[in-house]
Image: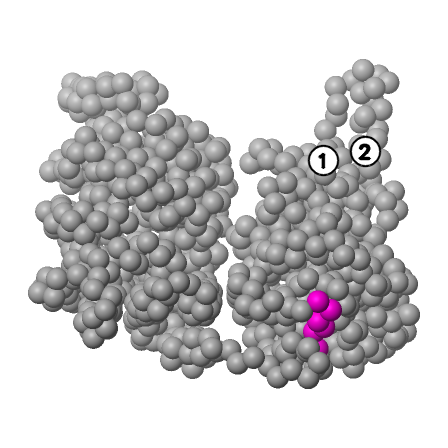
């Protein structure tokens, strides 16, 4: 279903006029427009739930889509009204339940290659979904223009990442095809319509097998079809249908027959590998101009698919055999013979796309592929024997570190660690999977490149292998720690997974050679010394990698001790880059600028600009703390970091480049220059969008700082939108029950409370309480925050009894978990004072507020004037106006500077 602005019909499914207007929306839109034109009346809004409907975008098998405006978050959306009329015996109510459940699951996805679902609900018997409105067209329309095979593969890789992200969350699409992918004008594909075509597996209604009579589709769907072939050559198919079939009649099984996997035809339960099959049908069609299976009618097509009877590969194409091998494996008859996951298929396509062409193909050569390709292929030139692959074993070391057995051990350990750990692992595993896939591809690439380089090819190969060995050591260190169930591993596993990815350093030939010179290993002729030096370098780096993981997962004492040992070892061996790396880690962990300055001197002396930039950034980051170095000093370090990066050139160390404006924004926040902070953070977020995955820790931190800045500027609605985007990204990166998601939910509650949206505030605070209770336990003081906030919601509603109970619970949690004088107590004590004032108990209020004041006096902050104002009100309520003057006067003095909200000043 198309939810784009540019294309207003669902290709292959008829024009918008084809179906009735759900809930009379078309009629209401027409009447409103007629009133405006004929009677000169102001355009009357047509609404569905809270949405203002603007116009119809298109109609397809799943229903009708309208452009609409969401006044709550002030954005345009695509509003889909799902047609439940064809669900047969399941009934409309069951259909609604299934569709809403699927939509909520899809809404939890926060991925750049998935159309975002913002909301779902029902009006009468109609199910609706509010979705991202994409400015663009379908992938099928995009393919109508002549494309290079590399561009086609790249586009499908991106779409495949959307599918993979859904699979990681347990969501199966069930109807992947080019019509269900939208390509925005920004060139980014987004997969749409997850799981809306079929009931969930396991229902009685889905158990019967599909017969030929159940499968009714057009001739265009049944045939292989013909489309422009990648690189412009023509396909040999017999038709040009879009392949956009409708739900088969007489069965609950759904999908478009031309893209359905064998198990879908048979009515068996389907899963991610069924999506993989449909994906590979679509990619085959896009590359070769025809689909892999053909039939003159539905029965013939079904028979071909169920028999695994593919068409011969057409002649004259320019698609490399490695690409076809990856696609054909995804088209295997049995799911077990396909790629293990979409991640593995994407990795195979990436390697095939990026690999240099190793052999020239003779004119007229044809590709001979057997019925069971299973990852192998041969170039048929008469009876020529296959050429041995010198790089066949290049990826072998990966299997010892990252394999099915280890993944299973980690999954089992994380399931036992803490309630949110399993969710977090389901998000962390794909990160590590991508690192492993890239590692394998890069190691093979290093070998292949060495076959075609000059005199230094063997040396550079050894350097790249050594660098990749260091990267593999980081992956091994983290995987080993995650095999033990631990709370900190679950809490910080995603950040540690981001830190594992240092592969960019291994792609940079200049950096590799610079490191060789910096560590005194530049005598290429002394092979023994070179091999020994690289071995010692890697051994020290492996030890430092394990220290990094220990620190990330909450064991700083061991980490610091190991890093100090690496410093001593590296210094004694003259390995300056290793010594600088170890000093950098120590300086970060201890927040000691002197250690970081030592690391900076080492990096500058070694001539390693990437290290120098990273150390200078770390020195600048110390300036974020209120007690950090002076801001001019921090900014000077930041300027040096930028200079080092500029020396490297524009396309290197891209992750470090994201941090420069991010740190500038954080320093501006410390200074109180919120407008400058906003500009820097927006720049950082734009760079993160270009150079980092959306789930990367640095991207999440930038989003958090941006939302905080908007809130400080009083832009509550944009702040709420920024927090919503952050929460979606966190749910995808960390899992929906991770404590950080609870923190963002809490911030959303605070934002809603400031706008007096009490119902929204309560919903967010309750979500924070649920997440933190599950993560930390009933007795943890962290629960005091949402309890106190919920108490404030009740107070503002005038519900003083429940409000007091919640504040008392918060006080007990803080006292038992933090002690009787902890600053956290000031919030519930102040709230109890306010409740007592409203209840006509000024003496009780005064006792609460004087205790709060005593807690705050040793370390006063911005909260103090509020406590003093409430105390003055309590004393006034007791009838002692003279005594009330002193706290009120002090509060007014504290609220008299320019940075204080004038409303609060007026309140005092």
Image colouring: one colour
Looking at the picture, tell me which residue is in the foreground, 317 or 130.
Answer: 317
Q: Percent position (x, y) of residue 448?
A: 46, 68
Q: What residue would you read off at disc 2?
A: 28
Left or right, 463 with respect to 880, comes to right
Establish if 630 lies above or below 114: above
Q: Which residues are magenta?
A: 363-368
- Residue 444 lies, with reference to residue 813, above or below; the image says below
In this orientation, which residue lies closer to the viewer: 531 or 711?
531
Q: Position of residue 50 (x, y in %)?
A: 64, 38
Whole-percent x and y of residue 420?
40, 64
Mark 2, secondary structure of its residue: helix
**Residue drawn at (34%, 76%) of the image:** 483
Residue visible at 20% across and 64% down in the picture: 523
Q: Secondary structure at mark 1?
A: strand
Q: Residues within 10 Å of mark 1 (few under 14, many from 20)?
A: many
The label shown at residue 110 is none
Locate residue 897, reporting x and y percent: 23, 19
Q: Is residue 195 magenta?
A: no
Left or right, 854 with reference to 686: left
Quarter holding the C terminus is: top left
Q: Which residue occupies 87% across, 71% down?
A: 295
Identify the mark at residue 53; answer none if there is no mark.
1
820 left or right, relative to 677: left
- Judge whether residue 463 can be spotted in this image: yes
Residue 727's place in the image compared with 338, above or below, is above
């Amino acid at each position: 279903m198309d939810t784009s602005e540019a294309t207003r019909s669902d290709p292959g499914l008829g024009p918008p006029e084809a179906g009735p207007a759900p809930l009379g929306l078309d009629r209401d839109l027409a009447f409103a427009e007629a009133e405006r034109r004929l009677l000169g009346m102001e355009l009357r809004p047509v609404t569905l739930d809270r949405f203002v409907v603007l116009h119809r975008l298109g109609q397809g098998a799943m229903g009708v889509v309208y452009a609409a405006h969401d006044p709550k978050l002030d954005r345009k959306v695509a509003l889909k009204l799902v047609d439940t009329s064809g669900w047969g015996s399941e009934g409309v109510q069951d259909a609604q339940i299934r569709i809403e459940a699927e939509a909520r699951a899809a809404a939890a996805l926060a991925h750049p290659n998935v159309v975002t679902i913002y909301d779902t609900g029902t009006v009468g018997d109609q199910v609706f979904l509010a979705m991202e409105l994409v400015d663009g067209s379908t992938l099928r329309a995009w393919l109508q223009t002549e494309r290079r095979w590399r561009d086609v593969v790249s586009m499908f890789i991106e779409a495949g990442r959307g599918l993979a992200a859904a699979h990681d969350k347990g969501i199966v699409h069930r109807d992947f095809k080019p019509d269900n992918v939208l390509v925005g004008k920004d060139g980014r594909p987004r997969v749409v319509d997850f799981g809306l075509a079929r009931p969930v597996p396991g229902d009685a209604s889905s158990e019967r097998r599909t017969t030929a009579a159940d499968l009714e589709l057009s001739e265009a769907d049944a045939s292989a079809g013909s489309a422009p072939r990648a690189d412009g050559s023509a396909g040999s198919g017999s038709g040009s249908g879009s392949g956009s079939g409708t739900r088969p009649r007489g069965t609950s099984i759904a999908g478009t027959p031309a893209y359905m996997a064998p198990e879908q035809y048979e009515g068996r339960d389907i899963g991610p590998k069924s999506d993989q099959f449909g994906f590979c049908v679509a990619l085959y069609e896009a590359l070769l101009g025809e689909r892999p299976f053909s039939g003159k009618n539905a029965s013939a097509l079904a028979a071909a698919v169920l028999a695994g009877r593919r068409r011969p590969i057409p002649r004259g194409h320019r698609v490399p055999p490695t690409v076809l091998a990856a696609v054909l494996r995804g088209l295997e008859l049995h799911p077990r013979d396909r790629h293990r996951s979409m991640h593995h298929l994407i990795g195979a396509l990436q390697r095939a796309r990026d690999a240099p062409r190793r052999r020239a193909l003779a004119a007229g050569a044809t590709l001979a592929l057997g019925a069971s390709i299973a990852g192998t292929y041969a170039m048929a030139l008469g009876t020529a024997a296959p050429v041995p692959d010198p790089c066949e074993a290049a990826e072998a070391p990966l299997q010892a570190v990252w394999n099915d057995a280890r993944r299973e051990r980690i999954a089992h350990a994380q399931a036992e660690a803490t309630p949110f750990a399993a969710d977090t692992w389901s998000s962390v595993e794909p990160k590590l999977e991508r690192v492993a896939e890239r590692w394998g591809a890069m190691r093979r690439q290093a070998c292949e490149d060495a076959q075609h380089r000059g005199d230094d090819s063997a040396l550079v190969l050894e350097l790249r292998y050594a660098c990749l060995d260091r990267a593999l050591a980081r992956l091994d260190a983290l995987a080993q720690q995650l095999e033990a169930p631990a709370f900190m591993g679950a809490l910080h596993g995603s950040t540690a997974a981001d830190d594992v990815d240092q592969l960019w350093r291994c792609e940079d030939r200049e950096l590799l050679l610079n490191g060789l010179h910096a560590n005194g290993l530049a005598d290429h002729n002394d092979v023994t010394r070179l091999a020994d030096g690289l071995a010692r370098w890697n051994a020290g780096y492996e030890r430092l990698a394990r220290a990094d993981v220990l620190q990330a997962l909450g064991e700083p004492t061991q980490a610091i001790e190991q890093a100090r040992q690496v410093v001593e070892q590296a210094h004694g061996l003259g390995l300056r880059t290793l010594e600088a790396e170890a000093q950098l880690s120590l300086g970060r962990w201890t927040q000691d600028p002197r250690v970081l300055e030592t690391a900076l001197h080492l990096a500058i002396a070694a001539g390693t600009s990437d290290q120098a930039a990273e150390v200078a950034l770390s020195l600048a980051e110390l300036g974020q703390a209120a007690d950090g170095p002076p801001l001019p000093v921090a900014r000077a370090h930041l300027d040096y970091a930028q200079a080092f990066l500029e020396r490297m050139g524009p396309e290197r160390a891209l992750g470090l480049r994201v941090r420069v404006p991010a740190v500038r924004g954080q320093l501006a926040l410390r200074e109180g220059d919120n407008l400058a902070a906003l500009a820097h953070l927006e720049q950082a977020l734009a760079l993160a969008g270009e150079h980092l995955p959306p789930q990367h820790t640095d991207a999440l931190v930038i989003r958090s700082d941006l939302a905080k800045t908007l809130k400080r500027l009083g832009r509550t609605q944009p702040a709420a939108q920024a927090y919503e985007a952050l929460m979606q990204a966190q749910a995808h990166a960390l899992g929906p029950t991770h404590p950080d998601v609870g923190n963002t939910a809490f911030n959303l509650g605070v934002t809603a409370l400031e706008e007096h949206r009490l119902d929204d505030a309560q919903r967010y605070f309750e979500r924070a309480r649920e997440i933190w209770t599950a993560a930390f336990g009933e007795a943890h003081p962290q629960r005091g925050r949402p309890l106190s906030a919920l108490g404030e919601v009740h107070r503002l509603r005038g519900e003083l009894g429940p409000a007091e109970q919640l504040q008392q619970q918060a006080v007990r949690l803080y006292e038992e978990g933090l002690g009787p004088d902890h600053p956290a107590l000031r919030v519930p004590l102040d709230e109890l004072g306010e409740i007592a004032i409203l209840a006509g108990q000024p003496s009780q209020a005064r006792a609460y507020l004087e205790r709060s004041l005593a807690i705050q006096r040793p370390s006063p902050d911005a909260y103090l004037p509020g406590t003093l104002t409430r105390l003055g009100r309590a004393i006034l309520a007791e009838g002692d106006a003279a005594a009330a003057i002193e706290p009120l006067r002090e509060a007014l003095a504290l609220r008299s500077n320019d940075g204080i909200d004038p409303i609060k000043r007026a309140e005092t």
